[in-house]
Image (tube, helix red, strand yellow):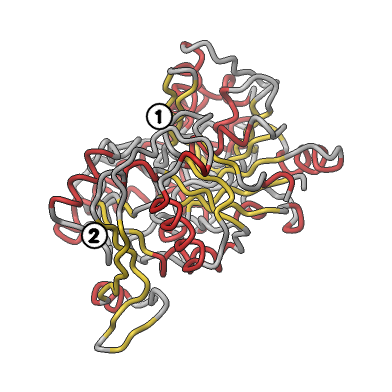
Amino acid sequence: MSSVAIIGSQWGDEGKGKIVDWLSSRADVVVRFQGGHNAGHTLVIDGKEYKLNLLPSGIVRKGKLSIIGNGVVINPTALLKEIKTVRDKGVEVSPENLMVAENANLILPVHEALDEAMEIARGGKSLGTTKRGIGPCYEDKVARRGIRVCDLREPDLLLEKLEAMMRHHNILLKGLGLEEIDPKEVQSELLTLAPELLRYAGIVWRKLDEVKGQGRKILFEGAQGTMLDIDHGTYPFVTSSNTVAASASSGTGIGVNAVHYVLGITKAYTTRVGTGPFPTELKDETGEFLGQKGKEFGTVTGRKRRCGWFDAVLVRQAVKLSGMQGIALTKLDVLDGLDEIKICVGYELDGKKIDYYPASQTDQARVKPVYETMEGWKQSTFGARSWGALPAAAVKYVRHIEELIEAPVSMLSTSPERDDTILVRDPFLG
């Protein structure tokens, strides 16, 4: 086994940062392949906390190559600021250990302005975006008017493309009561950033083909979660990219046969940030308990996460969509102290039981969870590093989850610390 893809199996915030960091100690290359700086990973290493939005989690480890693939949309100002932030914490960042795909699209100020204006215009029916310009940037990419990293090398072409872009967007900005944007001003800002950003620009697909041929281990790091996938998630309350495992290939230029193991990061309960359907959401004391104990606040926005019981139907669907061979179960310790724990094992829709999450927006809002109740445990699981250190009821809970989602638990995380992990099966060894 030479490559592993890390995929969120719920609505994001499953604890991917810690697991990616844990696995990056075994990898040679760590790659981001979709999303933008709307996704956040929090790492805790030797008591020091790192909050990463665009940089792959491998950047905090010496001797690792970190790559930002073509499927990522990049805010150049945010990226350079993040590089400075981690450098200030003692992390080395240079073209030797960071490569940015030259064909990745750039998020510009116009994208942020449009994102915020459109959310405001939606009023009470907002999509709950982070207003960071991710969606509008992907729209421009698909509409073939986007600006890419490689365009920064050619000032005349850059201005020509910016003028074409603003001819489109300024009409909308004016209609929303906002000021039009001068393409020459944007060009000037980008050319100021260009020398530093272009230091990292490279041909990602070729580099990955090279390291694959050398038999080096590659870790593909997904952002957000499966249920935020633009095609397979709770549309339209989703992100603007594909978050499933197949994107590891299209978002980097490596062949689909390069990913040998797909690991789904799965929280022991369920959370969601922002609007959108959430069948197992708890709006009671238990939901508040999970949120407070789990410190459920968004890494990027600081928004309070909605909390609910584990949804086995949703996770099983994610397992199928990405071909997950195993999951890393996180935050089991948050459930410590509960008298009973519920698991959603099906849905009821119009009096009929179904075993899948429907695509229809109307149906998603109407499904009712069907629960099984399990005995809780009073003992602490925090920091456990072996099955023997877990209460019997906790082990029973984990084993039942495996049965319901039709995938084994490959790793079990019991705290934010990297070493507080029970390894069942090393993904790099298959």
Q: Is residue 304 above or below residue 194?
A: below
Q: Where does residue 270 sit, x and y in percent of width and height?
A: 34, 54
Between circles 2 and 1, the one closer to the viewer is 2
- Lateral position of residue 250 relative to residue 226, left or right: right
Give me the residue at 60% from left, 30% from top.
58
Q: Is residue 54 visible?
A: yes
- Lateral position of residue 225 relative to residue 333, left or right: right
The residue lying toward the viewer, choosing from 255 and 57, is 57
Asked if the residues shown at circle 2 and circle 1 are in contact, with their CB atoms under 8 angstroms apart, the answer is no
Which image quadrant is residue 219 in?
top right
- Lateral position of residue 384 relative to residue 321, left or right: left
Residue type pointed to by label 1: Glu
Residue type pointed to by label 2: Glu
Which image quadrant is residue 299 in?
top left
Q: Which residue is mark 1?
A: 185
Q: Is residue 182 above or below residue 278?
A: above
Give me the residue at 36% from left, 50% from top.
169
Q: Is residue 359 above or below residue 333?
A: below
Q: Which residue is mark 2?
A: 281
Q: Where does residue 140 sit, x and y in percent of width and height?
A: 47, 52
Give me the residue at 68% from left, 53% from top.
261
Which image quadrant is residue 348 in?
bottom left
Q: Earlier in the sequence, mark 2 or mark 1?
A: 1
The residue lying toward the viewer, choosing from 216 and 209, is 216
**Label 2, label 1: how far apart the Cα atoms are:** 46 Å
Disc 2 is placed on an element classified as: loop
